[in-house]
Structures are given as C-alpha cells and as structure tokens.
Image (cartoon, rainbow, N blue to C red):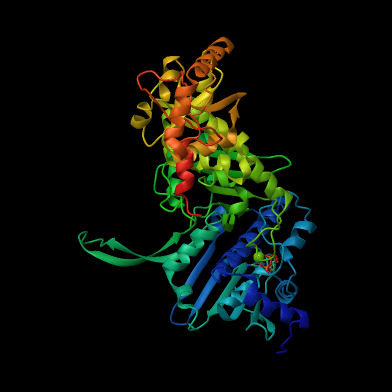
Amino acid sequence: MEKKQFQAESKRLLEMMINSIYTQKEIFLRELISNASDAIDKLYYKALTDEELSFNQEDYYIKVSADKEKRLLTITDTGIGMSAEELEQNLGTIAKSGSLAFKKENEIKDGHDIIGQFGVGFYSAFMVADAVTVKTKQLGSEQGFKWESNGADGYTIEPCEKETVGTEIILKIKENTEDDNFDEYLETYRLQAIIKKYSDFIRYPIKMDVTVQKPKADKEEELEEVTEEQTINSMVPIWKKNKSELTDEDYENFYHEKRYGFDKPVKHIHISVDGTLRYNAILFIPERTPFDFYTKEYEKGLELYSNGVLIMEKCADLLPDYFSFVKGMVDSEDLSLNISREMLQHDRQLKMIAKNITSKIKSQLKGLLKNEREKYETFYESFGRQLKYSVYSDFGQHKEELQDLLLFYSGKEKKLISLDEYIEKMPEEQKYIYYATGASHHRIEKLPQTELVAEKGFDILYFTDDVDEFAIKALASYKDKQFKSVSSGDLGLEDAEEQAKTEAEQEEHKALFEHMKQTLGDKVKDVRLSKRLRSHPVCLTAEGELSIEMEKVLQAMPD
Ligand code: ADP
Ligand code: MG
C-alpha cells in the first residue's frame, strides 16, 4: 500500500495548527461532532431534492464511545459518508472544506445550518490523538473506505468493510504527559461535559453509553449498575423556540443550567432579529450581584454561538461596560469567524449586534422601572451603584443613556424616585433639583442646610453613596434643571427684591462679620448673613464646585 505524503505546506500547516491555533484541546470534540452534524445535514439536503430518498429524523444520530483499555475514542455518525476521492480531497488537503463546497454546489443559500467552512477542524483531533482512523461509506455506494494517519507523517487510504452508510472517526488517545492529562478524554463524565458545553444545541442526538445506578428489577431496595444509551445534548436551542411556547420557568431553568447565576433573574429578554442583521439572543438581568462583581476579577460578556455551536464563552464586545451585569447568549449565523472559531474578526456584524442588544437592554430596564417598580428596585439595589459609576466614568460619555435609569432617595417622599419623578412634582417656582450629601438619611435630615429648602416645600434628594454626587456632577443638569447642593452658597431661593434686602443687611452688619472672620482666621473664607437658617444659628456652606462631603471623599482617596 502506498503511503501518500501531505503536501509540504500542508505538513507545516498541520503542525502549526496542532500546536497553536486552538487554545483549548477539548474543542477537538466540538469539531468532530460539528462535522458529523454537517454530514447528516447534507443527507437531509439531498433528501429534499431526491424523491428516492426519505429522511426519517429518528434514524440519524451521532454516537460518542470510549474504550479506556484500548485508549480509543470513537465518534460515529449516520451522515452522508465520503467516497475515496472525497477522503483524499477533504482529509488529505488541509484547509479544503468539503462542506463549503457542498453549500456552493447545491446553492444552499439558507443552508446556514452547515457549520464547516475552513477545512481545518478535523485535524484538531491530532491535539489529543497519536493516530486517527476514519472509516466511511458514502450514500449510494457499496464500498467502504478507511483513511489512516498518525499526524504529520502522511496518510493511507484503502477499501474496508463497513456495513452502514456514514462515518466513524476513531482516535487513539495520547498517553498523559507532565503538562497534559489526556486520560480525561476517555472519561464518560468529562466527555459529557464537553458535549454539553459546546454541542448542546446540535440538532441531532449525540448519544453515549452511560453507566447508571438503578433499582434491581427483583429487589427494588438494591441498586445495580446498568449501562444505558443516553442522549447528551438538548438539541433544540431554547432561543430558536417560539416565545409563546416558553414560560418564565423555562427561561429560569436555562439561566441556572447555563450557570449564569444562582439567583432568580428579575427579567429575561428574548430577542429574535431577522433581516439584514440576523441573530437570536436570550439575556438576563440578574437579581443579585455575583460575588466578584465590584472587583477587578469580574469579567463581563455574553456567550457567543455560531449556528448553535459555542464559539466564545465570554464575548466582551457584545456588552458595554455599563451593562456588564447582563448575562446570556447570542447566536448568529452571519459571523465571520477566524480559523480556530475561537475568535471573531472584529466585524461590523458584531458591532451592530452589540448596539442592538444595548438598546434592547436599555428599553427593558426602562419598562421595568415604569411597570414593575418593585423588581426594578431589587435590581437597582444590586446594580444601581454600577449605573451611577458609569454615568461619570469614561468622561461621562454614557450619561445620556443612563440618566433616566437612576434612582435617588427622596427626602420628602421617603423612598427612591427617578429624576423624572422629581421634576414632575417640582412646584413652578422651583428652579433647581436640590440634593444633600451625608452619611445616612437620618444625618442628612438633621442638616441645618436642608431647612430652608424643605420649608419652601421643595424636595431634596439624599445622597448617601459616595458615587452619588460624582454622578450628579457629571450630569450637571437633567432636562434643563440644574442640580444644586443644599450647602452651596446661593440656593437660588430669593428673588431680586429679597436679594437686595439681604445685601443691605449684610452691609449693615459688616463690622460684626469682619470681626468674626478675623477671629476664625484660616478656618473660613468668609462670614456672611444667611437666610437659609431656621432653628440653627449658624451653618457651613461650600463656595466652589465641590460640596463639603465631596471634598471629604476626595481627601480620603489615596493619591
Ligand atoms: P470544515 O468542517 O470546516 O469543512 P474540517 O477539517 O472539519 O473542515 O473537515 C474537512 C471536510 O471533511 C469537511 O468539509 C467534510 O467534507 C469532510 N468531513 C469531515 N468529517 C466528516 C464526516 N464525519 N462525514 C462526512 N464528511 C466529513
Ligand atoms: Mg469541521
């Protein structure tokens, strides 16, 4: 039998690929299963146009089986199979994709279910295997063929016995090395986990023989180990189902199954977009902050699928920082993937999806605020700080998007209110949105500075979080109403006549104020007559941009 050589470039490419394209060895299984699924899809497409063929969904499956003793892992499919020439072309030439050719030949435009396109995935098997054997029989053929290779050395093709149509890929799993554990690719639980992780939504059943404990038939109280064939994948992705078929519980189960969090999300967002931009997404607004949310360790991102196959676990580009708390997934058929399918070319498509998602999240949050206030407040308790922080970070460039999502404690109403709600209740003569900063609501209530404003009947927002005032400073105003600290010099409460009167009185007692100022020395900048006091004889006010409390925060910060 003649041993054929991979072409020189191919040989180099194969080595390069085995060692460097993929960051995780476990994806070899994703690649082989995707190929098996493609092969079944092709049979399905053929059946659509060939009256002689029928496609009975139940007859088509993928099977993964491991033999620990012999160190063999086998992936079997009931797909279309390959002829000797196809084996030569598709597996002998790296970067030749039979699947891409199939899509073109058959002019399958919406054949976006077929995953293959680069013609390299198959070789990822060599990351975990010393040798790979492919046994295959093509649809309509009597003869089976066997392709064998131990990697960079070349491959052989010869006729072989094979009863059924389809393909069997047999990997001789490598021995463990110091750095790598290969044994795990022969362990059922590990294989199950890899299948769940990457291939859960492959549309054909992926079966495995699994050993389970079952009560004995004759003695129910005793357990025995039995091996049964189980389907590992859930097959139909929830995001492809019709929204009307799904209940809140289905979404919640998905949230927990995917381990997006352990809490109960306050809201799910199911998006199906079909047009120039095509994608499905299921997003969640969590109820509680993940334990590391307010640390540097927290990584934002959504899961990214291409045709139901997981490409990236945390695609950060899909979420703006200010919505980093959102969990979920996006599936799109139109992504331009790079060759390892681990990363995306940073393309327009992804940017458009991200933009679209961002505006959906925004409108859902607004809806929640308006219609499901209690839920919104639960959410706000966990993530309000993040929103306020995002208003002033990045030079305040996102403040427009976020300002109407903010809530602050209202001194008058004794509850959280939005800025819109504050403005709606403003009496006509009120010019500013007033706020007061302090350590607690109780302490703020006791501030002498709040007295006059409160007496006028104007509401005051109580700021107890140190990000509050920074956020407000970044906003400067809301719907043309400026923010004003109750401890700022001019409260804007007096009309021209009153102001003139105050100034006159100030003049009158000039000597007294001068004397007080000199006695206090460096401690104050000025001593003035105040109209804001009621029950207190004196209070401190800030002259410049910063309130006294904000200055305290700044001074407490490390340089
Ligand atoms: P891609 O899937 O991107 O095309 P691969 O390297 O994974 O590239 O596979 C190369 C080609 O080999 C496929 O396009 C397909 O034509 C063929 N092939 C691989 N696995 C199978 C299989 N299980 N059944 C039929 N054909 C297969
Ligand atoms: Mg492939």
Q: Quadrant of ligand 1?
A: bottom right
Q: Is residue 294 left or right of residue 112?
A: left
Q: Kindly give the residue lying farthest to the top in the view shown.
A: 497
- Marker count (numbered): 0
Viewer-nearest residue: 550 or 10: 550
Can residue 347 be seen? yes
Residue drawn 56% across the image and 30% down it? 404
Can residue 251 be seen? no
Quadrant assignment for the N terminus: bottom right
| x then y, percent, for residue 437 | 44, 33
Q: Kindly give the residue lying farthest to the bottom in the view shown.
A: 1
Q: Is residue 316 left or right of residue 108?
A: left
- Position of residue 175 relative to residue 197, above or below, is below
Where is residue 309, by image quadrant?
A: bottom right
Viewer-nearest residue: 4 or 493: 493
| x then y, percent, for residue 108 | 75, 52
- Position of residue 279 relative to residue 412, above or below, is below
Residue drawn 46% across the image and 33% down it? 518
Where is residue 165, by image quadrant?
A: bottom right
- Position of residue 120 relative to residue 403, above or below, is below
| x then y, percent, for residue 366 | 54, 30
Viewer-nearest residue: 174 or 421: 421
| x then y, percent, for residue 282 | 54, 43
Viewer-nearest residue: 50 or 15: 15
Residue drawn 72% across the image and 81% down it? 12
